[in-house]
Amino acid sequence: MELPDTAGVASFVVPEGFAPQQTLTLGDDVAHHMKVRRLANGAPLRLTDGAGHVASATLVSLARNAATVEVGAVQEVPPLTDVHLLAPIGDRDRMLWLAEKATELGLTSWRPVLWHRSRSVQPRGEGPGFQAKVRARMVSALAQSHGAWLPNVYPDATLDRALAGLPDHAPRLMLDASGQPISEAISGNPTSLVLALGPEGGLDEEERTKLTAKGFSAVSLAPTILRFETAGLAALAIARSFTHH
């Protein structure tokens, strides 16, 4: 069954999932956002579980700490072509901004890496508490962008551990000012892609050597020096332009 057009309809993420014609009670976070949106009983809604399922729904009632909704049709949305990111552990606010925008662009996985030059950054975005903030920011971005798939978020890792967890047979690109233009490095319509994004100050020689040994090619974005969140967003947007079909 096709879902109705949900452009302009309030969208919410329900990670626990849903089923057609199910009545759901959603918690205080959702209820708060509905009140901010000034939604009235009977308002149409869009729900997603972040795992490829999207539903139309109707707001039945809105209380102080909960909202009751009636689920309508449910549809499966195929995932976009995989785009994986080795993200730098860096400034917390910049990481959160990048996580939000990467979700809007349909990022597949987020692997935070403690690069050598990450160690001097204070305060850094790391640890389970910060990961929860990243996840919350991604959930909000998914709802706002009307996406259907949340990125997989992996624990903080050294470069060696991050490399060991990457999918095989995917083109691998590391952002480096010495590389060829990224648009020239991505050809055709790749079935998956891995991007390595270094910290402020860039990758050091040991890291470049490790990445090259694992099949990464150096690519550049601009003739100027970019902050890591700017470089990450630009690279993801370019990569997605080749892989969104």
Image (cartoon, rainbow, N blue to C red):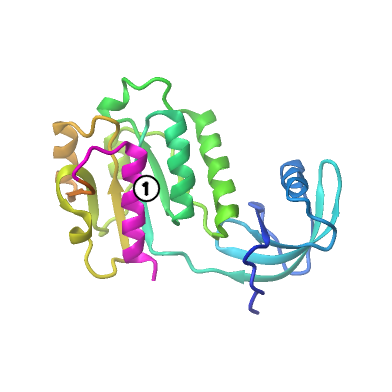
77 with respect to 36 (left or right): left
Q: Which residues are magenta?
A: 223-245
* Secondary structure, magenta segment, majority class: helix
Along the viewing direction, whichever of 160 and 206 lies nearer the viewer: 206
The spot of residue 78 in percent (x, y) is 49, 69
Question: Closer to the camera, 6 or 79?
Answer: 6
Tell me what residue is drawn at x 31 percent, y 44 percent. 231
Which x, y percent locates residue 147? Answer: 54, 59
Q: Give the quadrant of the N terminus.
A: bottom right
Residue furthest to the front in view is 224
Residue 70 lies in quadrant: bottom right
Q: Is residue 17 above or below residue 110?
A: below
Find residue 73 and report its horizontal and vertical position in percent: 70, 72
Residue where numbered disc 1 is placed? 233
Q: Residue at x 22, y 59 (%)?
A: 183
Q: How many marks?
A: 1
